[in-house]
């Protein structure tokens, strides 16, 4: 299958990029080092193991999101332009390869690459949290520590299934961001694309601020229409970060599985529209 062949080639090229490897290794290293938070910040002794685990989960998800954003941007801005720079685009399109197959294959390759990097970071994150939870249980089992902490300490679960849904939500926002950057790569230069993609993420992450600006006292009709358009057109990246309680301490999700499914459908809808737009632009692009 042509799309799959292009996707596999894209994955191989992407995983060989040194900058992507650096971001992934640094993120994994910081997640592992976060095990020392309780000793460094004396957090457990102040509020208990459950608060310490909350900090660890929030830091892990936040670090994954931060590393993934840069990986998505760096990967996305070079997907199409590097084919022009190498002049391999002419060889590929000279074969019986349709343009929509080329775009779809490159995007699928990007998703697979992000899946591999997110999977490695997510596995490290889950193992780190579980190790911390086991340590908290062993600490609470100590008679001396148990007397100091008292009977009011909240019990800590060894494994929280919501961590998996949190990792999936992190991956979904990478998927949406990659589709936007892929579309921009057909319109803007590499440098402009990088900053445009970063700006879209920041504005989408601050969608609640955009809403308040549109409804601010003294805003005229043009300002309201402008901010409302931005709110509905750009993706709601903040909604993908709900599990990170440090970023959204006021939000509680009762059913993470259902919430993740809802966000997956939202992400797939946005990606579908963006990918169709990219294909239509590439069909009319002179190569």
Image: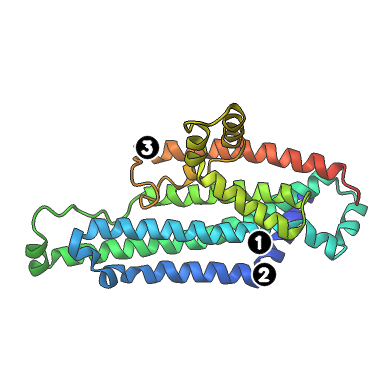
Colour scheme of the rendered structure = rainbow
Label 2 to label 3: alpha-carbon separation: 38 Å
Mark 2 and mark 3 residues within 8 Å of each other at the beta carbon: no
Classify mark 3: residues with Cα within 10 Å, few (<14), some (14-19) or many (20+).
few
Residue at (43, 49) in percent of width and height: 166
| Label 2 Cα crowd, 10 Å radius (few <14 / some 14-19 / many 20+) | few
For disc 3, the marked residue is 255
| C-alpha distance separating marks 2 and 1 | 10 Å
Circles 2 and 1: CB distance less than 8 Å? yes
Mark in the foreground, 2 or 1? 1
Which callout, 1 or 3, points at the residue further toward the start of the chain?
Answer: 1
Q: In this view, does 93 lie above or below 63?
A: above
Mark 3 falls on what kind of element? Answer: loop
* Image side of residue 191 versus residue 96, left or right: left
Q: How many marks?
A: 3
> What residue does disc 1 label?
74
Secondary structure beneath label 2 = loop
Q: Do the residues labelled 1 and 3 touch (CB within 8 Å)?
A: no
The residue that mark 2 highlights is 17
The location of residue 196, given as percent across then percent down, is 66, 52
Q: Residue furthest right?
A: 94
Q: Is residue 31 left or right of residue 93?
A: left
Secondary structure of the residue carrying tag 1 is helix
């Amino acid at each position: 299958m042509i799309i799959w062949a292009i996707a596999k080639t894209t994955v191989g090229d992407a995983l060989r990029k040194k900058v992507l490897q650096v971001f992934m290794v640094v993120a994994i290293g910081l997640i592992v080092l976060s095990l020392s938070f309780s000793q460094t910040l004396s957090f457990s002794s102040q509020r208990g193991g459950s608060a310490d685990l909350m900090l660890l989960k929030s830091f892990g998800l936040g670090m994954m999101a931060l590393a993934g954003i840069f990986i998505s941007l760096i990967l996305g801005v070079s997907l199409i332009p590097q084919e022009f720079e190498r002049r391999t685009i002419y060889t590929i399109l000279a074969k019986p390869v349709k343009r929509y197959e080329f775009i779809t294959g490159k995007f699928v390759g990007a998703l697979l690459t992000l899946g591999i990097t997110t999977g490695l970071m997510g596995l490290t994150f889950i193992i780190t949290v579980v190790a911390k939870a086991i340590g908290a249980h062993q600490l609470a089992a100590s008679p001396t520590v148990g007397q100091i902490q008292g009977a009011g300490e909240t019990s800590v679960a060894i494994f929280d299934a919501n961590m998996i849904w949190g990792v999936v939500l992190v991956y979904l926002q990478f998927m949406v961001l990659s589709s936007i950057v892929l579309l921009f790569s057909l319109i803007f230069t590499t440098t402009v694309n990088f900053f445009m993609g970063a700006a879209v993420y920041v504005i989408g992450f601050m969608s609640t601020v955009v809403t308040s600006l549109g409804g601010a006292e003294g805003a005229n009709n043009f300002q309201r229409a402008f901010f409302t358009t931005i709110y509905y057109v750009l993706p709601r990246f903040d909604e993908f970060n709900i599990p990170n309680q440090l970023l959204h301490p006021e939000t509680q999700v009762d059913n993470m599985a259902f919430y993740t499914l809802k966000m997956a459908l939202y992400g797939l809808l946005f990606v579908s529209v963006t990918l169709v737009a990219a294909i239509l632009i590439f069909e009319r692009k002179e190569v």
